Amino acid sequence: MKLTGAQILIECLKKEGVDLIFGFPGGAVIDIYDELMKSSIRHVLVRHEQAAVHAADAYARVTGKVGVVLVTSGPGATNTVTGIASAYGDSIPVVVMTGQVPTKLIGNDAFQEVDIVGITRPCTKHNYLVKSVKDVAQTVKEAFHLARSGRPGPVLMDLPKDVMVDRTEFKYPEAIKMRTYNPTYEAHVGQIEKAGKLIVQSSRPVLYAGGGIIASNAAEELTELATLAQIPTTATLMGLGGFPGTHPLWMGMLGMHGTYCSNMAVANCDLLIAVGARFDDRVTGKLDAFASHAKIIHIDIDPTSISKNVRVDVPIVADCKNALGKLVTFLKREKDINWKEKHEEWLAQVRDWDKKHPLSYKEEKGVIKPQYVVEKLYELTKGKAIITTEVGQNQMWAAQFYKFAEPRSLMTSGGLGVMGYGFPAAIGAQLAAPDRIVIDIAGDGSIQMNIQEMATAMEQRLPVKIAILNNQYLGMVRQWQELFYGKRYAATSLATAPDFVKLAEAYGAVGLRATKPEEVVPVIKKALKTPNLVIMEFVIAHEEKVYPMVPAGKATTEMLLV
Amino acid sequence: MKHTYSVLVENKPGVLSRVAGLFSGRGFNIESLCVAETLDPELSLMTLVTRGDEQIIEQINKQLNKLINVLKVVDVSEGDFVEREMVLVKVKAEGNTRAEVLRMTDIFRGKIVDVSPKEYTIELTGDEKKVRAVLELLRPLGIKEVARTGTIAMIRSKKTP
């Protein structure tokens, strides 16, 4: 029997295990929606297409599956671009389906026509314009395969309206073989041996873990390696949760707002083992001062990440889980080494740095400090919540003061840094994990970038908790202006803002406000007990800054401290 | 350092744009780019000439390989290779320069492919150095127009069995 393109598309999605789609309809995708409605796949109607991609992104992060988005042509498609670029920056598997005008009209400047394949070429792992109904099944198969394999990433399929209406025989390609795409998963034995030997020889090693640990489910292997060889461990923002935040070998995040301990350890180590991380400028600071005394081992599935910013001594192109497993096996053969003794001096030094400048903040009478709010969120959720963040100070305080115990518990736009990511991400995360507490740690600036999703959360009955750290500023930019721009606060005041409690109520959600430190705990407790969408507004110290801070372009040892 | 790449790609719409976009998006240079179908109509061969330090060249190589439509990337300039470029030059040829243009064409083993009372159009092939030399020598005679194909290149066969 012949099926329409839309029917084939839905059948293919089911075959790929898709059970949930985030989307927003429009003229070019009515045919697809018509079929989607008849299928078993759940659809979540967002209120802005950008939010659909962020939600799918977080859904993918929590479940490890591919997040799926369906939007219409033209503005529907362009609105997804920020979401796609964010997923690309963080290597998150997302498939975005955009409607397109009929093939005959392509290039005609038709109504709601845009060259979305051209627009998203540099911010997708790959993208397709499907020109014939005969190509639909194969393209879906390839798109999902590309999104989830190798270094994951977003893939876009542009689907012209006539292709969705045309009919053809449906045959699903069970196997996939792409002769031009073949990622390397297995770590090279020779390179593992070289890396193992460097670890044996080193006396001041550091493990530096990135988002690759989460993507390849390698948290267990990472902890095993660190514990076995007694290596102090740090992580990037994307790697948080990849190593237990309460482990004795844990040093905290590194980089621009990393801990004193992590940055000092990296600067003084003689061996840096980078795993699934990419030496981003927010991590390295001034490049030639970064780990300048160290040999570097770099494990990454993407060869382009290796030796891109920093020269590497032992490159290992492989899946992190595979490489770490092999490294552990190699080191277990070194039975004569007493690792604790071998690294005793180094670990004592690391503990000293930690004691000298732990993460801290100054308490002020009668004023709520944002760090205190995050600490209490951590305590009252026993560290078991899924935390999403917006971007800016809220993101850094969340990263610093919430001790992430397990992978896939922090959702944040790390690479692209999208304000407005956190709330739609919380929606995606809550749908992926209905039984967990999901909290969006937000600022008063960024929450307003996708606040319209309140309606989505209410419609889906999602008990997401939003914690707004309200300092009436675009706080991170204000911090830079205070420190480096002579306190000229250009365009960073947000004194005009909605009443967030009333705003919550307007949507039928619950609004709570804390203006004094003693109100923080009761507000959080009440929110956690409320089986509904809640906005908690914490009116915090207006000029609180994120410390430590490495000024842009400086060495990471040149930290401004509390 | 100058590098010449042979890039085997799938013969699909948008592939050229992916390669060109990669170069412009990452601030790499393209000195010349030549694309045509191979014996296998599903594949095209791009010859791409670029410049950069060691680290940039390594990135170019890796980034090209990362593109989904790219099958194979070879830096032909790593070893012994043949490179050729074709150029069409329209030169002023009047009075006594008419013979001079002919002589130059002959010396560089070119061909006159179009003649008019005032101009000759010359077809020439050679490596980059030769093409540059010809153009420099013809310039004083009055070049009206130049069209170059860009370099194509191939690794030399092994001379010993």
Image: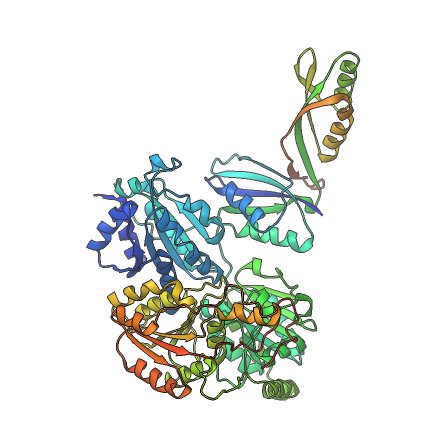
- For the point 61% across and 54% down, the residue is B59
Please determine whether, in this image, residue A11 is positioned above or below residue B142: below
- For the point 30% across and 66% down, the residue is A454
Q: Is residue A333 visible?
A: no
- For the point 51% across and 59% down, the residue is A184
User: Residue A307's image quarter?
Assistant: bottom right
User: Residue A299's image quarter?
Assistant: bottom right
Q: Quadrant of the C terminus of chain A?
A: bottom right
Q: How many marks?
A: 0
User: Residue B137's image quarter?
Assistant: top right
Q: Could you say which is closer to the camera, residue A25 or residue A265?
A: A25
Q: Could you say which is closer to the camera, residue A421 or residue B69?
A: A421
Please determine whether, in this image, residue B141 is positioned above or below residue B70: above
Q: Could you say which is closer to the camera, residue A465 or residue A129?
A: A465
Q: Quadrant of the N terminus of chain A?
A: top left
Tell me where residue A549 appears, x and y as whole percent. 59, 74
Q: Along the horizontal axis of the image, is A33 left or right of B72?
A: left
Tell me where residue A79 appears, x and y as whole percent. 39, 53
Q: Could you say which is closer to the camera, residue A446 or residue A265?
A: A446
Tell me where residue B116 appears, x and y as whole percent. 67, 12
Q: Is residue A264 visible?
A: yes
Q: Along the horizontal axis of the image, is A520 left or right of A396?
A: left
Q: Along the horizontal axis of the image, is A114 left or right of A270?
A: left
